[in-house]
Image: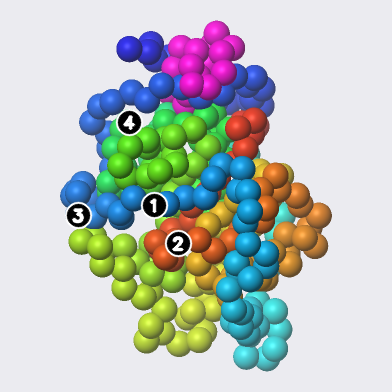
Amino acid sequence: MATRTWLKVGAPIAVAALAAGAIAGAGRFVGDARSEDAPPSEPEAAPADAGAPAPEDAGRVDASWRYDDRGNLRRPPAEEDYVCRQPQLEIEQTEGCAAGRPYPACKWRLPDPPDGLYEIWRNTTDDHRWARPGLVSLVLTAAAEYQRRWPGEHLTVGDLDAPGPRHQTHDRGVDVDLYLTEAMIARNEGGRRYPDNYEHRSRREVRSLRARVMDLAKILAVCADGRIRIYYNDPDLIHPFRAWYEERGLETPFSHAMRMHNPLHRFHFHLSVPDDLAPLPAR
């Protein structure tokens, strides 16, 4: 069993080694973990994203939701000066990190949520809260920046490393599921029930919800210097996000920074990052 150590994050981090062995145990998570709440196993794309479809993988688009009733582009919050600083938290890490060893000997654990900064998805157990330091750092940074920009709102974090029957990926410390439970196209209510979240809402409400999802995607892209891939099945968001991404001059090692995937990616982002993504500096 790997020895655990604690890392106090309070200065810019330079970590050469990345992530390690899952450690089982009871974890703090939101709601009651019920097996029927877990989505079925997800057939993910190959890690290299080889052979990804051309732009039609973004689906059909009607970007009118981006504009208000006067025809002005909606960009709430107006400024896009994203703060990419990891919040100061105690982060548990495996012994290999201090020894400068690479993944899987070095791994960070997503901390218990402090002061409502984020929530842990109801089925995410303690052994699924470990990943490479760069991914854990990005998740913490995105949660803090999202809450700063959308006061009263928060990110919900699902499985990080979770090899086994629930996922065919999530086994290299570079994948995580991220939820905005009331803002995305659908909700996961458990029992394999995924009701549409935009039905019976006004266009104004849907625009506001999509703006939140778009902002989260932009935070992740900027704070990872573009080096992300997001699976999310909303063509009305993918097209404008790709346009913004290209205008910003960002580049990804994957085929696209955002693309559609299997139908389960209506109620969450599946975020992937490269193996060598480094932790962000701390506040």
Residue 96 falls inside the magenta stretch: yes
For the residues labelled 1 and 2, say whether their Cβ atoms are less than 8 Å apart: yes
According to the image, label 4 marks what residue?
Answer: 127
Q: Is label 1 in a helix, a strand or a loop? A: loop
Picture coordinates of residue 87, whole percent (x, y): 54, 37
Labelled disc at residue 4: none
Amino acid bearing label 3: Glu
Crowd tier of the residue under label 4, counting other residues whose Cα lies within 10 Å: few below 14, some 14–19, many 20 or above = many
| 3D distance between C-alphas at marks 1 and 4 | 19 Å
Q: Is label 4 in a helix, a strand or a loop? A: helix
Q: Which residues are magenta?
A: 92-108
Q: Is label 3 in a helix, a strand or a loop? A: helix
According to the image, label 1 marks what residue?
Answer: 42
| 3D distance between C-alphas at marks 4 and 2 | 25 Å
Q: Residue at x 40, y 61 (%)?
A: 264
| 3D distance between C-alphas at marks 1 and 2 | 8 Å
Picture coordinates of residue 162, whole percent (x, y): 37, 37
Amino acid bearing label 4: Asp
Q: Residue at x 55, y 8 (%)?
A: 99
The vertical placement of 227 against 89, above or below, is below
Q: Earlier in the sequence, mark 3 or mark 2?
A: 3
Of badges 4 and 3, nearer the viewer stands 3
According to the image, label 2 marks what residue?
Answer: 262
| 3D distance between C-alphas at marks 3 and 2 | 19 Å
The vertical placement of 25 against 39, above or below, is above
Picture coordinates of residue 283, whole percent (x, y): 61, 34
Of badges 3 and 2, nearer the viewer stands 2
According to the image, label 3 marks what residue?
Answer: 36
